[in-house]
């Protein structure tokens, strides 16, 4: 089963009313995404003689994206993007900084700096947002296929995107001049980054309401994949606990997410940590 | 009180739970795991995903009391069970003590109908983690 068809099954098996979910690609992470990454242009280029602490700033039009080890971004080191991702217009908030392979992958994109700024505007970590795009598309701005509506670098379905971009605008009206309006915004990575950041913020706040303090990327992924009802329990479970027994998910729902009746919390966590790296997986979502 | 009695019955079985070598954190005693009562709360599969209809832990055994946090599928209750005014004494995932409508919980069971619970531990960051007894789940 391809990652794309798995996503469709995910939808059929419980996209909640209101459609607030992204489509989950853990199962696809080791398949399609790995293959995608293998075929992608090299993203880390470190020519001899360059300093190792170069911070990503403006992309050069016409040149491929370069990413240098940053040792963690810092507020003010990135451009402020507009809806087109060309860095020409300021948006509300500031970058929340970031680090790690996922962050570097996002920042290697022409829209990466603007996306990091979007995360800051929504009060979430740029690293956490980068984790989302790495998990969903390896930060490639891909269109919908297979009959589903999931599209863009953050692979949000239409209903989720519409709800979240509205929420983002309400949260910070200053971004209104920086986004592409309508569903077209889904395929503008900077605009979708605002919606994805708002979604991430919502998941983290939900976890806090369920007494999961300082929720991490891994915790938020639990809500994303297992839902608002059972996700917090997954976040509080030990490694060897059985996912089916603490979530109540059906065999079909488990299979749609690349899991089975014997899958443990530890196995699920390993899938994510292996994809993102432990420093990113355990990064707090909300900027303090 | 019938539900509380069921939970008490589950506690007897819990005392026979095995220990686990892979548990991370310091042991937490005085509380045990029960499941959310899907049947009584009439939770649908969609509810389990969205969290709709999941009850709140309150800071006192009173329906008008302040909300401490919403439960998930696995709930920590005092062992032995303490019920006051129809509310069962509970602990949140970050260790706060509160009260939950006793109708919202039910013992964790295995497929054969036997009851079980969990081992609780506190992580360095304060999160109370559970490790379920083998075979128990919220659907049985």
Image (cartoon, helix red, strand yellow):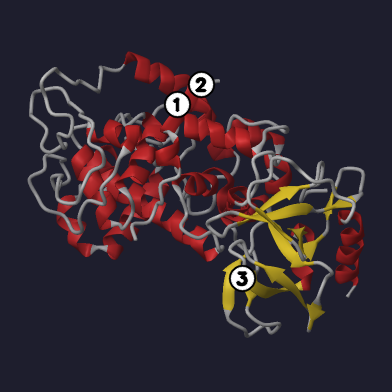
Q: Pointer 3 indicates a residue of which chain?
A: B
Q: Pointer 1 and pointer 2: residues touching (CB < 8 Å)?
A: yes
Kindly identify which residue carries mark 2: A2
Q: Position of residue A200 (x, y in %)?
A: 40, 51
Of residue B74 and residue A273, the one placed in the foreground of this image is A273
Q: Is residue A71 above or below residue A181?
A: above
Q: Rounded to the nearest whole Å, what is the CA distance between mark 1 and mark 2?
A: 10 Å
Label 3 Cα neighbours within 10 Å, binned few <14 / some 14-19 / many ≥20: some
Mark number, residue A24: none
Q: Quadrant of residue A116?
A: top left
Q: Position of residue A244 (x, y in %)?
A: 70, 41
Relative to A31, is A232 on the left or the right?
Answer: right
Kindly identify which residue carries mark 3: B96
User: What residue is shown at x 81% (from left), y 42% (from top)?
Assistant: B134
| Residue at the far top in the pictured view | A39
Earlier in the chain: of badge 1 and badge 2, it is 2
Q: Rounded to the nearest whole Å, what is the CA distance between mark 2 and mark 3?
A: 44 Å
Q: Position of residue A82 (x, y in %)?
A: 14, 47
Relative to A208, is B78 on the left or the right?
Answer: right
Look at discs 2 and 3 and give the one toward the viewer: 3
* Quadrant of the frame with the C terminus of chain A: bottom left
User: What residue is shown at x 76% (from left), y 51% (from top)?
Assistant: B138
The secondary structure type at the circle numbered 2 is loop
The secondary structure type at the circle numbered 3 is loop
Mark number, residue A146: 1
Marks 1 and 2 on same chain: yes
Q: Rounded to the nearest whole Å, what is the CA distance between mark 3 and mark 1?
A: 46 Å
């Amino acid at each position: 089963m391809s990652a794309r068809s798995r996503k469709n099954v995910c939808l059929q098996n419980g996209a909640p009313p209101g459609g607030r979910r992204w489509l989950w690609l853990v199962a696809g992470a080791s398949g399609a995404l790995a293959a995608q990454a293998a075929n992608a242009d090299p993203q880390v280029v470190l020519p001899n003689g360059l300093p190792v602490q170069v911070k990503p700033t403006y992309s050069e039009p016409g040149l491929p994206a370069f990413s240098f080890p940053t040792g963690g971004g810092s507020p003010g080191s990135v451009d402020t993007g507009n809806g087109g991702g060309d860095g020409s217009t300021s948006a509300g908030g500031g970058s929340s900084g970031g680090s790690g392979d996922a962050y570097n992958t996002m920042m290697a994109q022409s829209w990466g700096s603007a996306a990091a700024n979007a995360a800051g505007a929504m009060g979430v970590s740029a690293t956490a947002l980068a984790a989302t795009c790495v998990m969903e598309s390896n930060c490639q701005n891909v269109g919908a296929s297979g009959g589903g509506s999931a599209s863009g670098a953050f692979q949000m379905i239409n209903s989720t995107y519409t709800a979240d971009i509205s929420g983002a605008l309400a949260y910070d009206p200053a971004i209104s001049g920086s986004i592409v309006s309508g569903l077209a915004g889904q395929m503008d990575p900077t605009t979708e980054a605002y919606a994805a950041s708002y979604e991430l913020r919502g998941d983290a706040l939900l976890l806090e309401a369920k007494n999961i303090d300082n929720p991490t990327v891994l915790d938020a992924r639990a809500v994303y994949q297992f839902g608002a009802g059972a996700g917090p329990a997954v976040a509080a479970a030990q490694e060897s606990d059985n996912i089916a027994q603490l979530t109540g998910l059906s065999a079909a729902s488990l299979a749609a997410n690349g899991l089975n009746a014997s899958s443990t919390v530890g196995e699920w966590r390993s899938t994510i940590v292996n994809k993102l790296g432990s420093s990113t997986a355990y990064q707090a979502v909300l900027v303090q | 009180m019938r539900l509380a009695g069921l939970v008490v019955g589950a506690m007897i079985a819990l005392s026979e739970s095995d220990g686990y070598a892979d548990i991370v954190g310091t042991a937490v005693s005085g509380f045990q795991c029960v499941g959310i009562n899907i049947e009584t709360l009439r939770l649908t599969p969609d509810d389990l995903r969205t969290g709709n209809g999941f009850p709140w832990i309150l800071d006192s055994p009173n329906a008008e009391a302040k909300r401490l946090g919403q439960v998930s599928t696995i709930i920590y209750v005092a062992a032995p069970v303490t019920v006051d005014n129809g509310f069962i004494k509970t602990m949140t995932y970050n260790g706060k003590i509160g009260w939950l409508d006793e109708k919202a919980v039910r013992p964790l069971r295995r497929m054969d109908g036997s009851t079980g619970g969990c081992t609780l531990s506190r992580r360095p960051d304060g999160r109370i983690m559970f490790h379920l007894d083998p075979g128990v789940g919220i659907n049985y």
